[in-house]
Image (spheres, helix red, strand yellow):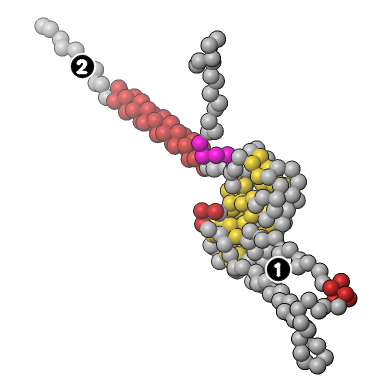
Amino acid sequence: MTRSTPATPKTGRRPVLRAALLASAALGLGLVSACGAGQVTQTAEQVPAVPGVNVNSADGNIALRDGVVAYADSYKPGSTVPINVRLFNNSTQAVKLTGVTSDNGKFVLVGGPKASVAATPAAASGTPSASGSKKPAGSASPSESASESPAAPPPPVSAGSSEISVAIPVNGVVLLSKDSQTYLAVDKLTGPPLVAGGSLTNVVFTFTYADGKTTTITLPDLPMTPPLTPLPKPTSVVQNENGGE
């Protein structure tokens, strides 16, 4: 008579397998979460690759972004030096940019409201005599001839208005650049020439709020922006003994 051995139940393996699967799933979710968190942190810390100075005002309500000197090969003394800036008003009231100063010359607003210029009265064409008649030509007395002086030269023409007033609405932004047709500029550069890699120094922006209070943004250096494309490199030409290339 053959005895049959009862089969060993396999129920003990199922809980172990199920626990292993749950552990693997939990581990996978943990890795994905960690990876995602790392990507968010890296994105949050990225800074846009835009040349220029980014500074906030002394009270933290006004933001200056992408501040640069417009690029040129060089600016000679006496020339106009334009700058580009973006101004953000993060306060709860309207504000105006009311002044800009620098160690390199007086700032003006180009393309904004023009300052009024008083007209110079024209010189009289002739002086009536006591009897009401004019003296004939060439009969001026020596004293009158000595008092006459050559006309003064006209005042130098300014690139813009020295009266700077740029309104920035609440939660608004204003772009001042040559592309926008309204921009700030050093009227006449003083000191040495400004070349690529150079900067305007000690540039101070003054803002006036609607309630009369003021705040400032100070830039120790305002650099010249690099060109959009690299400058061409000089080409070397080798000549042979006969003078040909």
- Left or right of 141? Residue 106 is left
Give, as a three-letter code, the residue at label 2. Ala
- Residue at image x 30%, y 22%? 13
Asked if 59 appears above or below 71 in the picture, the reply is below
Viewport quadrant of the N terminus: top left
Asked where in the image residue 35 lies, by quadrant, the reply is top left
Q: Is residue 65 magenta?
A: no
Position in image of residue 183 (x %, y %): 58, 57
- Residue at image x 65%, y 45%? 75
Which residue is under mark 2?
7
- Left or right of 62? Residue 44 is left
- Residue at image x 59%, y 43%? 72
Give, as a three-letter code, the residue at label 1. Lys
Frontmost residue, 7 versus 138: 138
Asked where in the image residue 157 lies, by quadrant, the reply is bottom right
- How many labels were placed on the picture? 2
Asked whether the viewer can see residue 229, the reply is yes
Residues shaded magenta: 225-229
Position in image of residue 129 (x %, y %): 81, 88
Q: Give whichever of discs 1 and 2 has the lower sequence position.
A: 2
- Left or right of 224? Residue 9 is left
Q: Residue furthest left?
A: 1
- Residue at image x 53%, y 11%? 242
Q: Secondary structure at mark 1?
A: loop
